[in-house]
């Protein structure tokens, strides 16, 4: 066992603050951490969790879940947190013992979900993590939804960072924690909320209200504040002034009535001049705009001026960067790498949005910021003179629409009243060090403080919603339940877009699934405008197994992935997503597999053939290894249920439809093959061997939970059994059919795992009917709802 102080110093190279040590070494975990920016909250929870899992006493270890899920409001924070976690794991020699995963759009390269018994750190945005926690994972195969849903809601420590930026997603985190308590989980599941500006009332949702009153909050103690390092950060001087943007007619021009576009252009020109004026050689100047469009406009204005260089080719020009959330990962990673690199002699000017508002470890000498709600401003101020080493640090706030009546459009993406209230307080300040801000807030009335930290829960997910979301089968029209309102506010929703060199419809048949490196987050409003202008985009149809043209703008929903032909434009490596950009997009590498579909059985394809018995024995071997890893969480009945499901899970592969699909099968429609080098199309579209397995298990009297696990093991058959639009009807229309299984289909006798023999059986689809069967047995749906 290693003492926490020694462990923390080995990981980070720093001595822990008292609050960091308290979080790690207390018998139980705190629920809330309130600490200013730069206080090391990420290190507190990540390094603290590692110490608790590997070096804490039995009581501490038992109260610490096996997985740490680190949820952040923005993608750029994910990438930085991932780098920190990788570095810390390396320094404490735990790389081989702890899985490290970044959950974003696209498939996961490291298949972290295959090892539920292994400690893991999972880092992602609220879009990716909350959607998975609600069984509707954005940017992933719909058939993987239930796996992530299970692992993120059992034996997991959720850390919600920078919660003031989460919007309606914050209420969802509270509700999910309430549901985990209500419905119960395996191994326990706890949440920790973190922010520099936390208010307990934010968590008082309808199902979590009573629990929110008893949450344990960890705040900075006097011991923390009195440490030399912390004291220096708390008192770091940052002078504050308003940036006056004056409308003045250009020299030689008479004053005349200007268009709104001309007025806006002149204001951005004025801001650009001020940025150039106050930038200091060898330092970082950070300009934070409220929207991507404003950031791009200012960036373009700065690139016009000869004193600023976006390509870093001139000796006397500061390096210029544009960073926002609408870049593909490779371009964004290159920009972030440059942002975090040593500052060149001529200095660096970074134009950005909220993506650097929190968590990004940069320190500007000069900071310009749009007026924003108070909680956001506090985070932005934390990007200036973070360590208190710059005596000339300056912060300028600006109101581009000064003199105009505030409207929702001018305050976007924030509420105009929240921005107005923040401006009132900005006018009273001349310094925004953490200590100055704390003193200022302490001097306000209770009413003024509450106005500065407004919060509305918006849409709140209820237990009825979670139960409905458990079934991943689309409705009869092929639609899924829309969860976007539970993840983000208003019109902030995104789709994922990637570009391919394809100009003709027939070429789409071979277009593979996107890798995460190709995906760009695009606002739904901008993507709809893109389609409105006549541009083409394609959506994968998981039933018909092809890319289909997206013809209706109203059917563009959050979390979906769209293929856009490169010739349609919409993206540049310098500016990111831009629906008006018409040049051909440069494509990047992609994966080698088609997206998953209802009929696909990619896991059945292997270089060497395996019989059902051979494959099942391997599954049982893997299951036993997992059971050993989580033995303390399972009863003997649990183990028996899992083993029975494993033994029978591929019973349905003995069906003639599966055996005939195996290319080169010497026995034709008969045989007991489970894996083969090549598997063709099924003669019955929609065929699912796991439904055949479950029906055979029901007829053998095997308990419902084992039957469900076998039916659901590919995520394609779950709570209901019904036919799909693509299915081929039986010649006798008076018999039932679903998922390629017909009434009275025969499964031959076959040897399963552990030497167990399954007798031949005639399948009945009577369980797909609602109500009791003729022999008084409940339907499949009733059985599953009971479970």
Image (tube, helix red, strand yellow):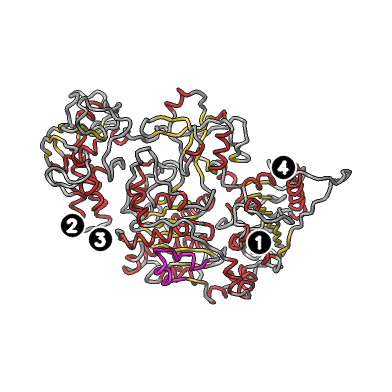
> Mark 1: few, some, or many residues within 10 Å (few <14, many ≥20)?
some
Residue 303 - label: 4
Vertical arrangement, residue 158 with respect to residue 552, above or below: below
Q: Which residue, given by chain and number where applicable, does mark 3 sit on?
A: 632
Q: Nearer the viewer, mark 3 or mark 2?
A: 2
Residue 69 - label: none
Residue 382 in sight here: no
Residue 420 - label: 1
Residue sitting at the far right: 252
Q: Along the polypeptide, which appears first: circle 1 or circle 4?
A: 4
Q: Nearer the viewer, mark 1 or mark 4?
A: 1
As helix, strand or loop, the secondary structure at mark 4 comes to helix
Give the percent coordinates (x, y) of residue 597.
35, 34
As helix, strand or loop, the secondary structure at mark 2 comes to helix
| Cα gap from disc 1 to disc 2, whole angstroms | 61 Å
Residue 423 in sight here: yes
Q: Along the polypeptide, which appears first: circle 4 or circle 2?
A: 4
Give the percent coordinates (x, y) of residue 339.
61, 50
Q: Do tag 4 and tag 2 residues touch (Cβ < 8 Å)? A: no
Give the percent coordinates (x, y) of residue 265.
74, 45
| Cα gap from disc 1 to disc 4, whole angstroms | 31 Å
Residue at x-position 57% and y-position 41%: 526
Q: Which residue, given by chain and number where applicable, does mark 2 sit on?
A: 636
Q: Along the polypeptide, which appears first: circle 1 or circle 2?
A: 1
| In the image, residue 481 lies in the stretch drawn in magenta | no
First to last magenta residue range: 198-217
As helix, strand or loop, the secondary structure at mark 3 comes to helix
> Mark 3: few, some, or many residues within 10 Å (few <14, many ≥20)?
few
């Amino acid at each position: 066992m290693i003492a926490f102080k020694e462990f923390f110093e080995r990981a980070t190279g720093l001595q822990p603050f008292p609050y960091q040590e308290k979080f790690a070494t207390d018998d139980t975990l705190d629920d809330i951490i309130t600490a200013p920016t730069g206080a090391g909250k990420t290190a507190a929870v990540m390094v603290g969790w590692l110490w608790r899992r590997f070096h804490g006493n039995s009581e501490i270890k038992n109260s610490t879940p096996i997985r740490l899920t680190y949820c952040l409001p923005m993608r750029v924070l994910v990438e930085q947190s991932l780098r920190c976690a990788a570095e810390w794991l390396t320094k404490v020699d735990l790389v081989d013992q702890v899985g490290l995963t970044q959950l974003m759009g696209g498939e996961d390269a490291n298949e972290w979900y295959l090892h539920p018994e292994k400690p893991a750190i999972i880092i992602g945005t609220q879009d990716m993590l909350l959607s998975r926690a609600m069984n509707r994972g954005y940017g992933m195969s719909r058939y993987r939804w239930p796996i992530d849903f299970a692992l993120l809601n059992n034996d997991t420590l959720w850390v919600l960072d920078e919660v003031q930026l989460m919007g309606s997603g914050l209420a969802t985190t509270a509700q999910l924690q309430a549901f985990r308590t209500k419905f119960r989980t395996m191994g326990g599941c706890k949440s920790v909320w973190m922010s520099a500006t936390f208010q307990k009332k934010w968590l008082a949702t309808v199902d979590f209200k009573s629990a929110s009153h008893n949450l344990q909050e960890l705040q900075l103690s006097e011991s923390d504040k009195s440490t030399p390092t912390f004291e220096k950060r708390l008192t770091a001087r940052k002078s504050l002034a308003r940036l006056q943007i004056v409308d003045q007619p250009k020299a030689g021009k008479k004053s005349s009535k200007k268009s709104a576009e001309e007025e806006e252009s002149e204001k951005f020109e004025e801001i650009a001049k001020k940025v150039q004026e106050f930038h200091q050689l060898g330092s970082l100047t950070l300009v934070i705009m409220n929207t991507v469009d404003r950031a791009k406009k200012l960036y373009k204005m700065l690139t016009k001026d000869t004193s600023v260089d976006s390509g870093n080719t001139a000796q006397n020009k500061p390096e210029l960067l544009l960073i926002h959330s609408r870049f593909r990962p490779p371009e964004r990673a290159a920009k972030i790498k440059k942002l975090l690199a040593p500052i060149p002699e001529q200095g660096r000017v970074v134009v950005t949005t909220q993506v650097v508002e929190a968590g990004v470890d940069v320190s500007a000498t000069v900071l310009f910021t749009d007026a924003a709600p108070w909680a956001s401003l506090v985070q932005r101020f934390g990007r200036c003179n973070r360590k208190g080493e710059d005596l000339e640090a300056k912060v300028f706030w600006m109101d581009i629409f000064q003199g105009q009546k505030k409207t929702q459009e001018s305050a976007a993406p924030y509420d105009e009243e929240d921005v107005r209230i923040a401006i009132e307080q900005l006018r009273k300040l001349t310094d925004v060090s953490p200590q100055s801000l704390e003193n200022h807030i302490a001097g306000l009335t209770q009413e003024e403080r509450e106005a500065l930290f407004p919060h509305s829960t918006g849409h709140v997910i209820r237990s009825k919603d979670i139960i409905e979301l458990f079934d991943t089968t689309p409705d009869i029209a092929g639609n899924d339940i829309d969860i976007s309102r539970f993840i983000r506010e208003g019109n902030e929703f995104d789709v994922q877009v990637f570009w391919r060199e394809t100009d003709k419809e027939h070429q789409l048949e071979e277009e593979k699934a996107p890798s995460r490196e190709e995906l760009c987050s695009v606002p739904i409003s901008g993507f709809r405008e893109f389609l409105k202008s006549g541009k083409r985009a394609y959506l994968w149809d998981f039933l018909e197994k092809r890319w289909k043209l997206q013809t209706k703008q109203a059917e563009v929903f959050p979390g979906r992935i769209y293929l856009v032909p490169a010739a349609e434009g919409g993206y540049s490596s310098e500016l990111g997503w831009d629906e008006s950009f018409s040049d051909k997009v440069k494509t990047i590498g992609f994966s080698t597999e088609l997206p998953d579909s209802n009929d696909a059985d990619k896991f059945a394809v292997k270089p060497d053939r395996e019989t059902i018995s051979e494959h099942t024995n391997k599954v049982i071997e893997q299951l036993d290894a997992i059971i050993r890893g989580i033995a303390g969480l399972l009863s003997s009945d649990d183990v028996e249920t899992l083993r029975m499901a494993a033994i029978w899970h591929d019973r349905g592969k003995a069906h003639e439809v599966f055996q005939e699909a195996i290319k080169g099968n010497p026995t034709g429609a008969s045989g007991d093959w489970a894996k083969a080098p090549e598997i063709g199309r099924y003669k019955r579209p929609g065929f699912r061997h796991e439904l055949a397995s479950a029906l055979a298990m029901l007829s053998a009297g095997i308990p419902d939970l084992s039957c469900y696990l076998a039916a659901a093991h590919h995520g394609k058959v779950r709570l209901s059994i019904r036919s799909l639009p693509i299915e081929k009807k039986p010649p006798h229309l008076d018999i039932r059919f679903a998922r390629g299984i017909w009434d009275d289909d025969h499964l031959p006798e076959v040897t399963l795992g552990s030497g167990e023999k399954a007798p031949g059986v005639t399948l009945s689809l009577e369980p797909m009917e609602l109500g009791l069967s003729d022999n008084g047995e409940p339907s499949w749906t009733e059985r599953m709802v009971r479970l």
